[in-house]
Image: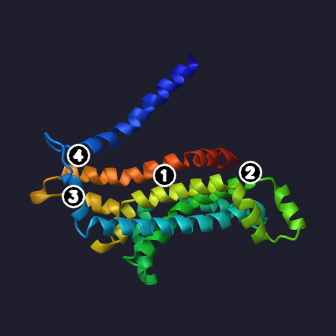
């Protein structure tokens, strides 16, 4: 009886969460009384072209995920394995960034990127996205490293391995679920974020998919082109859904071994 109730509840929640995506897909292919792919054709030719927006978004995702994984891995390793003065305070300050609503600091960041010559660039936007991801990412990676027995480090060091070799050869394979979790969160944030690209990017040929999809909702004389907008929603949601399904096993293990520890 308990198992049946569990499956019924899980199925109900699955339908609840999947229904909006199914509705968007239906609206995109049947805007009227007949089936049509015109909304996807308009999506492909909108503005600078769908290929430009997809390329911009993929570049942003690659830079954000790579930067987040690199910095969070090194920082998490340092926090988990190396005692140094002020380690606890620095870790708390890193987590404190989560309490700051990021839209409130986008304007100062815009000015800062101007000083660095990175205004209106995907590299500058990626740096901002990496900064927003680091508190959660460092927290996850620190706990993931702490879940690995220190005896593995000690055995490798006895054999003559240095700290970097221990990290690359011993610890990284053991914290793959944590890496996947951090990478997945960084991917979802950079793929779907709308506010940061809207403020930090001003050139049409550098817009990301979320900005383009929101802009394309306005059609002739201010009328909302719902079918094309829904086609954009479906196009954006499918990669996220597929990636999550593929990496679900690692994602769950990452939370179980990382976020629930410490």
Q: Nearer the viewer, residue 98 or 56?
A: 56
Asked if 158 appears above or below 2 in the picture, the reply is below
How far apart are labels 3 and 2 at the CA level? Answer: 50 Å
| SS under mark 2 | loop
C-beta proximity under 8 Å, tags 4 and 1: no
How far apart are labels 2 and 1 at the CA level? Answer: 26 Å
Which residue in the rendered view is the most extreme toward the left?
Answer: 221
How far apart are labels 4 and 1 at the CA level? Answer: 24 Å
Residue in the image at 38% along x and 38% along y: 18
User: Left or right of 232: which side holds 17?
Assistant: right
Instruction: Find disc 3 in the rendering and name its residue.
Output: 41
Q: Which quadrant, please, contains the N terminus?
A: top right
| Residue 209, image x, y percentages | 34, 62
User: Left or right of 100: which side holds 212?
Assistant: left
N-term mark: 1 or 3: 3
N-term mark: 3 or 2: 3
N-term mark: 3 or 4: 4
C-beta proximity under 8 Å, tags 2 and 4: no
How far apart are labels 1 and 3 at the CA level? Answer: 25 Å
* Mark 2 or mark 4, whichever is nearer to me: 4
Q: Which mark is residue 243?
A: 1
Instruction: Find disc 2 in the rendering and name its residue.
Output: 147
| Residue 176, image x, y percentages | 65, 55
Which residue in the rendered view is the most extreme toward the right?
Answer: 158
Residue in the image at 62% along x and 57% along y: 179
* Mark 3 or mark 2, whichever is nearer to me: 3
N-term mark: 2 or 1: 2
C-beta proximity under 8 Å, tags 3 and 4: no
| SS under mark 4 | helix
Residue in the image at 74% along x and 54% along y: 146
Badge 2: residue crowd in 10 Å (few <14, some 14–19, many ≥20):
some
Instruction: Find disc 4 in the rendering and name its residue.
Output: 29
């Amino acid at each position: 009886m308990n198992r049946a109730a569990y499956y019924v509840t899980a199925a109900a929640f699955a339908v609840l969460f999947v229904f909006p995506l199914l509705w968007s897909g239906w609206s995109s292919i049947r805007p009227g009384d007949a089936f049509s792919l015109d909304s996807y054709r308009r999506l492909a030719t909108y503005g600078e072209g769908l290929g430009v927006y997809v390329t911009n978004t993929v570049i942003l995702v690659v830079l954000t995920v790579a930067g987040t994984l690199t910095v969070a891995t090194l920082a998490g390793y340092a926090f988990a394995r190396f005692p140094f003065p002020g380690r606890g305070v620095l870790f708390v300050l890193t987590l404190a960034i989560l309490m700051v609503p990021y839209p409130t600091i986008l304007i100062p960041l815009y000015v800062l990127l101007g000083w660095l010559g990175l205004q209106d660039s995907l590299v500058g936007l990626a740096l901002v996205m990496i900064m927003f991801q680091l508190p959660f990412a460092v927290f996850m990676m620190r706990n993931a490293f702490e879940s690995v027995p220190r005896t593995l480090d000690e055995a490798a060091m006895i054999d003559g391995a240095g700290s970097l070799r221990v990290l690359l050869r011993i610890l990284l394979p053991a914290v793959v679920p944590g890496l996947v979790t951090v990478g997945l969160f960084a991917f979802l944030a950079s793929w779907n974020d709308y506010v940061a690209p809207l403020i930090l990017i001003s050139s049409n040929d550098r817009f990301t998919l979320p900005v383009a999809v929101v802009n394309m909702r306005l059609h002739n004389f201010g009328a909302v082109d719902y079918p094309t907008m829904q086609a954009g929603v479906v196009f954006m949601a499918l990669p996220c859904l597929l990636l999550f399904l593929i990496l679900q096993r690692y994602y769950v293990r990452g939370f179980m071994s990382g976020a629930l520890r410490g």
